Image (tube, coloured by chain):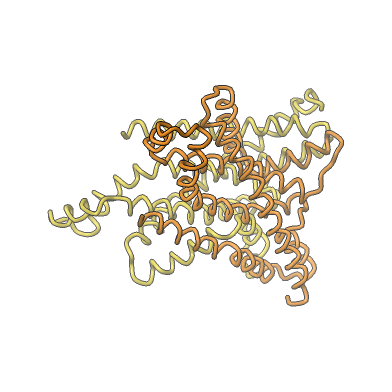
Chain colours: A orange, B yellow
Amino acid sequence: MTDYFGLYMKGFLGTTLSSTLALAGSFLIGALIAVFRITTVRGLRWFGTGYVEFVRNIPLLLVVYAFYYGPSALGFPLDGFTAGTIGLAVYTSAFIAEAIRAGIMAVPKGQMEAARSSGLNYIQTMQHVILPQAIKLVIPPLGNQFINLIKNSSVLTIVAGLDLMYFADSISTETYRTFDTYIFVALFYLVLTLPLSYGVRVWERRLQRN
Amino acid sequence: MDFAGAYSADHLKFLLDGLYVTLIVAFFSIILSFVIGCVVGIIRYARVPFLSPIMFVLVELIRNLPLLLIIFFIRFALPEVGIRMGLMAAAIAALTIFEAAMIAEIVRGGLTSIDKGQIEAARSSGLGNFQTLWHIVLPQGLRRMVPPLVSQFISLLKDTSLAVVISLPELMHHAGIVIGHGYSYAIPTLLLVALIYFTVNFLLSLLSRRLESREN
């Protein structure tokens, strides 16, 4: 097994890179969609709701396929890693949008009213009063989404996305030792996900105490 | 984009065959994972010596691994140690193990959310530990679990698509085959399949809203 350590590390890096990029992307899209969902502009609100409901109710693999086969059909093929990472970002953004929206909604209404009546405008209120409070509540669900991203990035293997599972597959076909290979791969995943789960739990407990 | 070609009668029938397998696998996995998840969740809640810590470790390990890995493991690694399963059984087993761990956490969370006063009141009116759980904590806890349980079932239905890695002939697998017939079918096929998943899941979430409003 140690002969293949290089390959495992390659996969480990692929998984980490893809999940981190997808986290950044899904946070940007998710924040935008969350803003759409709480604005008073009806068209944007409809779009935001439609986006979240649609994306949350279809499988991740379908989103990844859309970014893998779709561009090929239109004449500009994307490689598995790129298509997979974009798919992960788009899929996860719907869940992050909901987490951000829930965090903003959880800040008591009186805060908004108080800030507005002390002369802050909407943007200032959001920036200085609402968002700093909301972000604390949003961190645990964001952490959970990051854990999900790491686990979900394994679908990259289906489009040859050079992640842990992809290299595991080639190692196990080369060595004929499937059992050992996948136990090893499981350990690599746990190295990433277990500390994150623990961190999320600690943060949640701290929130509950306050 | 070739909508007419992608939606030919043969392709539509082929996709519906896939949907049938998806629904069958999802149905059995939902029932099995709910039963196992409830048992494990109750064990974790009840703090049984030895058993509860073991369940804690198992649940944590499974929840922190990719489902895809579990599917692979059951289909390709277990035969090495003499455990062999058919395609359908392997898919159901993997989904059940993974989702049961998720459901166990939902069940435990629902049970611990019940007010301590309720338990004290039940105990002081002479109910035993088990009676308190069965008549007081479970009925109220289950009601609170309905929304997270339904979203977990929706996840499960979506997750059946990961069984493409073991070539289970379900909806996504069949969609992949149709796309393989020609890239001009890709976008129309994916649109149709998205609509099918969306419809099934949307019906499930409507059901959840129904259940919730009835219970309040």
Tell me: A201 left or right of B70: left
What is the quadrant of residue B112 in the picture? bottom left
Work out which residue is located at the far right of the displayed protein and give it. A75
Tell me: A70 left or right of B101: right
**Residue located at (55% from left, 30% from top):** A49
Q: Which of these two is toward me, A27 or B131?
A: A27
Q: Which of these two is toward me, A63 or A26?
A: A26
Residue A43 coordinates in the image, percent (x, y): 58, 22
Tell me: B105 left or right of A191: left
Residue B134 coordinates in the image, percent (x, y): 27, 51
Q: Is residue A48 above or below residue B33?
A: above
**Residue located at (60% from left, 37% from top):** A32
**Residue located at (17% from left, 55% from top):** B127
Number of numbered labels in the structure image: 0
The quadrant of the picture occupied by the N terminus of chain A is bottom right
Q: Which of these two is toward me, B65 or A47?
A: A47
Residue A12 coordinates in the image, percent (x, y): 70, 64
Residue B30 coordinates in the image, percent (x, y): 49, 46
Work out which residue is located at the far front of the displayed protein and give it. A119
The quadrant of the picture occupied by the C terminus of chain A is bottom left
What is the quadrant of residue B105 in the picture? bottom left
Work out which residue is located at the far left of the displayed protein and give it. B125
